[in-house]
Image: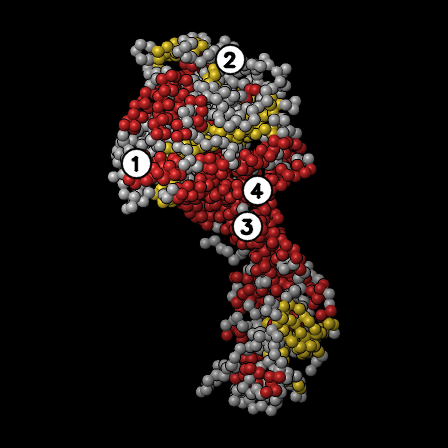
Amino acid sequence: MKHLWQRRSLTWLGLLLAFALVVAACGDDDAATTTTAAPAAATTTTAAPATTAAPTTTEAAPEGKPYGGEAIFANDQEPPTLNSYAPGGDNFIVSIVGQGYWTGVQEIDGFTLEIIPEVVTELPTVANGGITLNADGTETIRYTIRDEAVWADGVPISGDDFEFTYNIIMDPDLPITRTTYEDIDPDSIVVGPKTFEFTLTAPTVQAELIFGALIPKHDVEGSDFINDWNDTMWVSGGPFMFDQWQKGEFIRLVRNPNYWKTDAVTGQQLPYLDSVIIRFIPETAALINAFKAREVDVINPPPSIETIEDLQTLEAEGAQIEVLSGPIWEHLNFQFGDNRFERNPGSYNEFLEYRQAVAHLIDKQKIVDEILKGQVEPLDSYVEAFSPTLSLGAWAQYDYDPDKAIALLADLCARADTDCDANPVSTVFSTTSNNDARVTLSQLFVGMFEAVGIVYTNELEDSSVFFGETLDFGGTDLGEFAWVGTPGLAGLVGIHDIFDPEAPPPDGQNFYRWGTPEVTGADPEGYNQGASSVIDENTARFAVIRDAMNATVDEVELIALMNEAEQILADQVVIIPLYARLDPGAVWADELGGFKHNPSQAGVTWNIEQWYRVDL
Amino acid sequence: MSEPLLQVSNLRTFFTTEEGIVRAVDGLSFTIHKGEKFGVVGESGSGKSVTALSIMRLIEAPAGEIVTGEIHFKGQDLLRLGDEEMRKIRGAQIAMIFQDPMTALNPVYTIGNQLVETIMLHQEVRKSQAVDIGIQALDDVHIPNPKVRMDDYPHQLSGGMRQRVMIAMGLSCNPDLLIADEPTTALDVTTQAQILHLMLELTEERDTAVMLITHDLGVVAGFCDNIQVMYAGRLAERGTTDFIFDNTFHPYTAGLLGSMTRLDEVREERLYSIRGAPPSLINPSNGCRFTPRCDFAQDICGSKTPLPREFGDGHWAACHFAPDLDLSRVKRAERVG
Amino acid sequence: MFQYVVRRLVYGLITLLALSIITFTLLQNTGGDPLDRIKSNPRITQQAVQEMAVFYGLDQPITKQYLTWAGNFVQFWNYPTAWGRSFQGPQQVQALVINRLGGTARLMFTALGLAVLIGIPLGIYQAIKQYSFFDQATTTFSFVTFSTPIFVLGLGLQIILALKLEQWTGVKFFYTSGMNSTSYADFSLGEKIGDTLQHLALPAASIALISIAGYSRYQRASMLEVLHSDYLRTAKAKGLSQRTVIVKHALRNALIPVITLISLDIAGVLGGAVITESIFAWPGMGRLYIQAIGQNDWPIVMAVVMLIGVMVVVMNLFADLAYGWLDPRVRYD
């Protein structure tokens, strides 16, 4: 416990200092840079539950579940707005709360992590005729809305609501992210009472993610869209209705009596609960205490191993703790830009032998055992972290083998263009200093690197610096941080965008500068630097693959492209995936049933309509 | 001489400090008679003020404690009185005024408030009468516009004026004894004379006894009937003012006299100064405590404590060699008057 | 006197103007861009970011941004748009800030009230009983609480009095967090009062305990100085009773320095208590403020800083006037 206090105190101190000195984007020590934040209810096609699912929920008895009662879910964040389309609406907690009252085309099944239809009868595919690939290279998509789908006030959900949603998003006066929607040809839209059809000018797998949260035309039309829907919500299409937001304290949702869904197993009308409270408790320790005191029923605390072990002691008292490995994956990465020489003048990053040697000298199993107490397996690929069934495990070729690393280093030094006597092989490792796991990692590395004769140095930085200038300007030699992956094909396409050799910062996300061209004229000056140290046939091929992935909706073709991309990244050792972070969800199972943790973007409230009081 | 008013016998007042026990007053006896002007003279730390506070029983416990002794005032032993009875004596029968008039008055209350408070405490009068008495008291100490001054705060008055207020306050209840602890030290020379003159005048009128504590023999010279010279918590010499000045028996008294400056005198030789500094009163050595600083000290002085001896007519001195020393080279020429 | 107040208020306005410029400049130069979070999302196009910047007025030159902000800010009667929009979501800053006033005031004034009502008498009593067992024991206690980080103190209280106490006794005495139960609106008056106290007790006690330690130490020192003063000896020499000496002559003088301390603490009330509010999930200003700092959400930071600034100016003036009322030596010119 004391340990935890210390760490948190440092965070506060950091925040206070930040006021005086530098306020950077990533102040939180657990901050991971987000790759793919899809609008509203997100994503995925086919993906099995992540690697280590702890005990799964007991299936509820089919003879019927009790109605009534209230559940309290507590979270450390509070929504900055309730409107997912407004600035700030892409915040994770906005959709966590929104699961209660939004409805849209798709949702994510927490058991299978598959994307399933919600308000439409089936997800459009080429096979079922929902998607038509036209001769002119365009793609027509057709939704058929369920007959029974109605808004909470009884008004049927119709094609007009789809069109209205589209019009809001495309309103040039509103600051809304329009990616993918911009590809819809406005003249192609066909609206029916229970149908909505449109044509995309270019086929993209991203289309599976759009229209995740419909806007009810009859309620929203004529309102001030950006100003009127921050503190309250339009008429619900989901199991609950927005009732009250006590700022800084909680949001209350109450039963939608007109919800159109029934329990597939029991046939009962959903939802079971009368109301749901989402409470906001910013301090993790306090969140845990509130759970222990049974003041809240469900929590999804930040994934520290101490927290998980602490919570697991409550299982004897009736709590159920599900520890899934989440979509956040930690990875080592080599910097290929010029600025790495400021960190380590003797950097050998451009040599494949060196990178392969690093891949062999790292004992991932030991890292996982030390940092995560062996609760997960180390990653053999980043794809494993969020779409394991699609993973090649391409890094399995680099087993822990110091001797092999030594041999590779010998090969490196034998090269004509290296001189290891004048410039001994050295590594400078940088990551955030205010994250316990990463500090532990840096300490483990000392022994591993020195065992193969590499001159090794740790240069850790506060997250505000690391995720600021250091990452932006490529100021690492060997770096370590995390990305959040989105399950499903669209997410996989998105994750490969960050290695796009054509997209160096500031416009792109290729922080590694693998294969990137020279950057000039950027502001601030630090972005400007020469071309990548590695530009070869692999980077060229990767750029081609990346473009092809973004231009197809053919699943077979996509998977083939992704496999090739994964293989290139592994063979070239651009990065070394380490492990996926744990994502714990805790519930008092003796009070609340129907809970199933979901580590994807859908979050713990994904099946909130299925929650019921066991104690009624 | 008239009847005794205050008889102090074998008073010992000690203070406990981290370094040890400070024997601030160590076996002191003296008597003040009704209406007598009694001077107590000595350097800082000689026990003058502690003696006065002991009489008032204002020694702060637990650090300070009156260890032994008796203090008979008008026949009753003050040290045996209860707190309540002692409070009735303080301010009413024994009043005290302090060295620094700048800090001795409470800054947040008016002169009138503090004056009336004292009067009403000890006299059975209504508020309006108390105010009248207060105005009269201010008038008696020659404060102009006493009625207006009643509403003034201490900081609005000069040092001399404030000391007049203190005197007015002290005498407002017609005490039998006024203890004045260095009443003029903080004042400039002209004001000093005025204040002393005023005190003398008022106490003569009322036949009030005064215990005037000072380090300055010049001050007592024109004021006191009797002088008691103290050194390191003990008596050095006591007698009538004339006798002390004329027939000094104790080397310390002589030293004090020799170091006096006088405005009416032009001297060729350097002013005398007593060498060294007053001794620590923690675990003092045996013998005469003045020994280390005494020009006349001999072996006996360091080993045997000289008891005060009477040399006739109330003249006491605590020196092994009194009255045989020739102190003329230390002492000054005759007192002028 | 009137002139003095007017002059002080004018100085106050100048101070606030300077404060706003300095704070604004600092916030602009601390490296962060309010749209950083949005920009780091690769699915948001440059064009969308640009639209967002226009929406928030961030495309304007810095001086213009300041002048627009300042011009709107002083027209605080234009609720709720006067203080601009939050960059985290498009909520109106004025509404967000005013929303926190109730919770902040409830927590901070309770804590301050407890601290003053307990700390001041405690310090006085400690001084009167200097070196007694009571003095030594409470002084030790003060040092322990004062040197305990509030994070440890708050979580300690939470674990012992909210969590463990309920486990041991089976009775709920205090809640771990929150300002009221979520079903508060349905409660009877009695239940409402009980519920409020059960939630308020621990966070208020966390802040108060540390303040009590501070106030009592300060008051003790101030009282001791007075107790050893010449005028107190005079009062005793006059034959006044111990009670009169303490109550009339010592107290008023000993309270004067503490007034400044209390006034400035009142001024700080609006800033809330960042750590305590987080631990006890209290809807206070501190949380709003610290989160805004982390997100480069300067309209909120500016609003809170300016409110605190106004309070400091007002309470400083109040302290000086109170000083003059308590201490006749102070004059206004």
- Can you tell which of label 4 and label 1 is closer to the viewer? 1
Label 1–label 3 contact, CB within 8 A: no
Q: Earlier in the sequence, mark 3 or mark 4?
A: 3
Tag 2: amino acid: Val
Query: What x and y, as percent, mark residue A483?
Result: 41, 31
Q: Nearer the viewer, residue A129 or A401?
A: A401
Tag 4: amino acid: Gly
Rendered image: mark on residue A150: 2
Measure how far apart labels 1 and 3 are at the Cα level. Answer: 53 Å
Quickly name the residue at label 4.
C154
Q: Earlier in the sequence, mark 2 or mark 1?
A: 2
Crowding at label 3, few (<14), some or many (≥20) Cα neighbours within 10 Å? few
Mark 3 chain = C
Tag 3: amino acid: Ser
Crowding at label 1, few (<14), some or many (≥20) Cα neighbours within 10 Å? some
- Can you tell which of label 3 and label 2 is closer to the viewer? 3
